[in-house]
């Protein structure tokens, strides 16, 4: 055979190999697209990408490492796959390698990790012979890294392997990200539904209507700083003679505080129906809460009991803001008797005290979300403003007095976001 014929044959063989390689690559891409396109589970999608990648380049072990929310930062290994059971343990992707990929965002082929000048000082696993690493890119932003270790036949990865793996990564990046975003959206919607139920439950725990107490005008309000809060108030009709009122503030905000609040309300209600002494009720409730909550969870609580026939009002205070009594003749008193907040000291003993309600007297019970409400100039609303509003509108109904205070606070803070719940109870003897 002449040289020209030999050259033609060699050329045709090379072209045939190239075409076969192209058909092989297209087949792999087609299979990958079909499999990952049918799933919206990010773990399944990534597992499929790794498995197909190992098969394409005859690798022993592969791993996908994702950056949080597609941003550069500390990356996290989420999925790992082994092609055979021969690998004794999963290989770790070194932080130096991740850093190189974040900086360069391009395929990386390491034929001899221990002597590679780019990673001098890196301690590689003795079993790692070669590494092939390609970026998962979306609009030039690194969202993850696909890394494959060791060819199964003992050879090293080739430029053709690098090219194919880079194509697989390019085809997979958006699908992986879409699956992850779908799961994040699903989790967000689930959290929103749980939050909606929490709000519904917490709202249901607040009094649905104000008990009718002969000779008294009573109103209450609670505005959470967030969707759910740690403040609460409650009215409890114990019998024909006794009526109890509570106002509490759980440390912290949001759902954790709301859960503690629910526990506290159930505890107080259980005690209030069998125990008429406010101090004894708080003492028992404190012991129960001490053993059912963590050390960083505590609550302040004012608990009062009105004797409707004698107009005596007995109360105990577990570290809460001192209620203010506006006498009909114009004097203003503070209910000073108080003890430690609930769930701090197991054996705390609380003390009862008493006031007498005269016609025209007004008792204001509140949480510090009112007095500590902050305006854009970082000034607090403070107790004096609240007192002045009650004095100015003392002849109004209890509900109106609460509305005046609420509106004044809202006007004072303007658009400043508040960090504390605002709760008020007004008891007025007609």
Image (tube, rainbow, N blue to C red):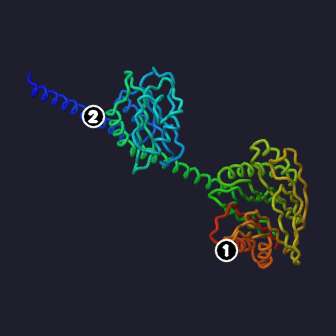
Of badges 1 and 2, nearer the viewer stands: 2
* Residue nearest the observer in this picture, 121 or 57: 121
On screen, 348 above or below 19? below
The residues bearing labels 1 and 2 have C-alpha atoms spaced at a distance of 67 Å
Label 2 CA crowd tier, 10 Å (few <14, some 14–19, many 20+): few
Q: Is residue 75 left or right of residue 413?
A: left
For image coordinates 36% across by 43% down, the residue present is 170
Q: Secondary structure at mark 2?
A: helix
Question: For residue 307, what is the image quadrant?
Answer: bottom right
Residue 27 got which mark? 2
Please state if 380 lies on the left or on the right of 129 as rendered. Answer: right
Q: Earlier in the sequence, mark 1 or mark 2?
A: 2
* Quarter containing the N terminus: top left
**Pick the front one: 425 or 311:** 425
Tell me the residue that label 1 is attached to.
Answer: 411
The vertical placement of 193 against 159, above or below, is below
Q: Callout 1 environment at 10 Å: few (<14), some (14 to 19), or many (20+)?
A: few
Q: What is the number of callouts on the image?
A: 2
């Amino acid at each position: 055979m002449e040289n020209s014929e030999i050259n033609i044959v060699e050329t045709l063989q090379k072209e045939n190999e190239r075409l076969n390689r192209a058909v092989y690559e297209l087949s792999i891409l087609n299979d990958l697209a079909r499999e990952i396109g049918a799933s919206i589970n990010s773990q399944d999608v990534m597992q499929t990408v790794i498995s197909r990648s190992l098969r394409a380049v005859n690798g022993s072990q592969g791993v996908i490492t994702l950056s949080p929310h597609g941003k550069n930062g500390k990356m996290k290994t989420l999925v790992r796959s082994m092609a055979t059971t021969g690998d004794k343990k999963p290989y770790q992707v070194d932080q130096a390698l991740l850093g190189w990929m974040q900086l360069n965002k391009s395929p990386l082929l390491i034929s001899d990790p221990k002597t590679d000048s780019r990673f001098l000082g890196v301690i590689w696993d003795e079993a790692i012979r070669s590494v092939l690493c390609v970026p998962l890119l979306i609009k030039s932003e690194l969202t993850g890294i696909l890394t494959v270790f060791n060819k199964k036949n003992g050879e090293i990865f080739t430029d053709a392997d690098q090219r194919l793996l880079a194509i697989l990564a390019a085809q997979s990046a958006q699908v992986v990200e879409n699956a992850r975003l779908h799961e994040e959206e699903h989790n967000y919607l689930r959290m929103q539904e749980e939050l909606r139920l929490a709000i519904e439950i917490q709202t249901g725990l607040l009094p649905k209507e104000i008990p009718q107490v002969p000779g008294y005008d009573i109103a209450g309000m609670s505005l959470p700083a967030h969707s759910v809060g740690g403040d609460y108030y409650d009215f409890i009709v114990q019998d024909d003679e006794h009526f109890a009122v509570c106002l509490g503030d759980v440390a912290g905000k949001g759902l954790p505080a709301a859960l503690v609040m629910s526990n506290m309300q159930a505890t107080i209600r259980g005690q209030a129906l069998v125990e008429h002494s406010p101090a004894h009720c708080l003492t028992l409730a404190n012991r129960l809460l001490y053993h059912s909550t963590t050390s960083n969870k505590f609550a302040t609580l004012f608990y009062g009991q009105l004797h409707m026939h004698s107009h005596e009002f007995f109360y105990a205070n577990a570290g809460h803001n001192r209620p203010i009594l506006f006498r009909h003749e114009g004097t203003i008193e503070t209910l000073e008797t108080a003890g430690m907040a609930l769930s701090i000291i197991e054996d705390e003993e609380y003390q009862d005290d008493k006031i007498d309600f005269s016609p025209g007297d007004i008792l204001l019970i509140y949480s510090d979300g009112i007095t500590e409400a902050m305006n854009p100039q970082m000034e607090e609303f403070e107790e004096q403003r609240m007192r002045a509003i009650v004095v100015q509108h003392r002849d109004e109904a209890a509900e109106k007095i609460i509305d005046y205070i609420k509106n004044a606070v809202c006007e004072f803070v303007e658009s400043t976001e508040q960090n504390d719940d605002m709760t008020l109870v007004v008891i007025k003897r007609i």
